[in-house]
Amino acid sequence: MSAFFTNRRGQTEVDAQEPAREVPTDRPVGFDTVIGSNTSFEGSFVSSGNVRMDGQFAGSLEVSGNILVGESADIHADINARNISIAGTVRGNITGSKVQLLRTGRIWGDINASALTTEEGAFIDGKITMVGHSATRPPTDDELAEREAINDSITDAEDDDEVIEAELVGEDVAVEAAADEPSEADDR
């Protein structure tokens, strides 16, 4: 064997090899399908893997994996995928777990997502609905009872001429009551 098959420390290729890593079959790596920038087609596109689209497409996109809409892409379709990154143009509704709109991304349509990130310069013309958050569901009986208790304490404090400070932190509400100090107008 020649020096091409050894590393700097004199190990042979067989000695220097790392053990092969197993790639889990349930987690796609890279892109299974790439639609190039010189490609244009229409219809119904269905994939169970990861997809990158750089060309033109019209129709519907149903992707079980992730989708990347590249900068040169011009998509006229509703997109339904697990995670969606948009750097190009999309005219259609977008539904996914996580939606990322990059600085060159343009969307004319509604977005339904659990998480949404946008970079400065991105454009959205549509309605954004955050799914899976407490704000998108009606309050539970316990939450209604807690709100009623807070409202009662505010009403009681107002009757007692107390000042109420309420602060909304996440889903928790902290209420502090303090006696109102007499003002100069009360002394007159």
Image: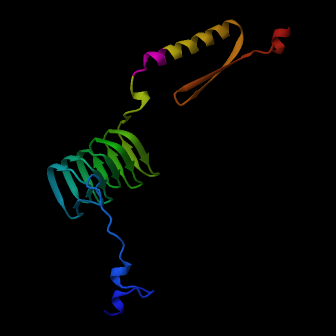
Query: Where 171 sits versus 146, above or below?
Result: below
Residue 10 vertical placement versus 20 (above, below): below
Q: How many marks?
A: 0
Asked which quadrant contains residue 23, the reply is bottom left
Q: Name the residue rendered at 38%, 49% in the picture.
A: 100
Q: Quadrant of residue 20?
A: bottom left
Give residue 168's position: percent from left, percent from top.
Answer: 57, 27
**Could you tell me which residue is drawn at 33 percent across and 48 percent down?**
83
Looking at the rendering, in which quadrant would you find the C terminus? top right
Residue 140, magenta (yes or no):
yes
Furthest-front residue in this view: 15
Residue 114, horizontal then vertical, whole percent: 38, 39
Residue found farthest to the bottom = 2
Q: Tell me what residue is drawn at x 32 percent, y 55 percent.
A: 88
Q: Magenta stretch: give its range.
A: 138-144
Taking the image as shown, residue 156 lies to the left or right of residue 92, namely right
The quarter of the displayed image where residue 186 is located: top right
